[in-house]
Structures are given as C-alpha cells and as structure tokens.
C-alpha cells in the first residue's frame, strides 16, 4: 500500500499517516538536538509544542470538516493538513533556532 499512494483511498490514508509520523519524528529530532536547546529549555519547548499540536489538530479537524464534511476523504485530508503544519513548524523553529530559549 505504501509503494503506490495513489492506488486506492486506503493507500492514500496509510501514506498520509506515514507522512505525519515522519514529520513528527523530524520535529522531535530537531528539538532533541543539544545545539538547538538546552535540557531545561527543551522541556519548555516540548510543553509549547504540546499546546501547538492541540491547536493544530483542532484547526485541521475544522478545516477538513468544512471542506469534506463527513466524507470518506476527511481522515486522509486531516492527516495531510497536520503533516503540512508540522513541516511548517519545523522550518519555522529551525529558522529561529538561535532564539528558541531566549529569556525576556
């Protein structure tokens, strides 16, 4: 199923799920790198990411419902939305890595 993501709706779903897992792993790996955050700062970043993930999930769910209603493509579209948001968040954090733990 993962070798041809466009073959069936089910394969699209599994590929979307895989892509989200990969995006989450990349984000978590970035945060875990010692050069990106100290151990004490990392906990703060992880709390912030937990809150961000809840907002991301709610946003994607609402967007998916608006676009697809209760249609069968909804779960796949939701995963795709969450994947894109996670990739964007990693890029954003990477661009601002030097300021992730600056105290104000």
Image (spheres, rainbow, N blue to C red):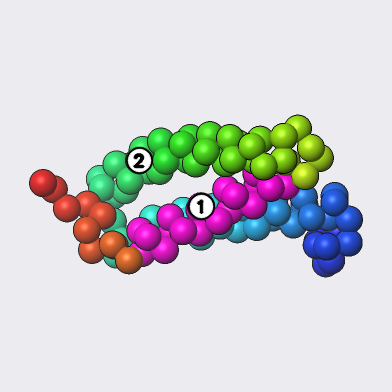
Pointer 1: what residue? Answer: 85
Viewport quadrant of the N terminus: bottom right
Residue shown at the point (77%, 52%) measured from the top left: 14
SS for callout 2: helix
28 or 13, nearer to the observer: 13
Residue 76 placement (x, y as % from top left): 72, 47
Image vertical order of residue 43 relative to residue 16, above or below: above
Examine the structure image and report whether residue 93 is included in the region drawn in magenta.
yes
Q: In which quarter of the image is residue 69?
A: top right
Q: Magenta stretch containing residue 86, yes or no?
A: yes
**Residue in front for this viewpoint, 1 or 12:** 12
Few, some or many residues within 10 Å of mark 1 (<14, 14–19, 20+): some
- Spatial separation of the CA atoms under disc 2 and disc 1: 15 Å
Instruction: Determine the residue positioned at 76% across, 32% down.
Output: 70
Residue at point 26% right, 54% down?
A: 100
Q: In this view, does 100 lie to the left or right of 87?
A: left
């Amino acid at each position: 199923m993962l070798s041809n993501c466009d073959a069936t709706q089910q394969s699209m779903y599994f590929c979307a799920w895989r892509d989200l897992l990969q995006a989450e792993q990349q984000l978590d790996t970035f945060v875990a790198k010692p050069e990106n955050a100290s151990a004490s700062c990392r906990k703060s970043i992880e709390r912030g990411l937990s809150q961000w993930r809840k907002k991301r999930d709610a946003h994607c769910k609402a967007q998916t419902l608006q676009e697809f209603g209760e249609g069968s493509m909804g779960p796949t579209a939701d995963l795709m939305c969450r994947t894109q948001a996670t990739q964007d968040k990693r890029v954003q954090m990477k661009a601002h890595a030097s300021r992730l733990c600056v105290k104000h």
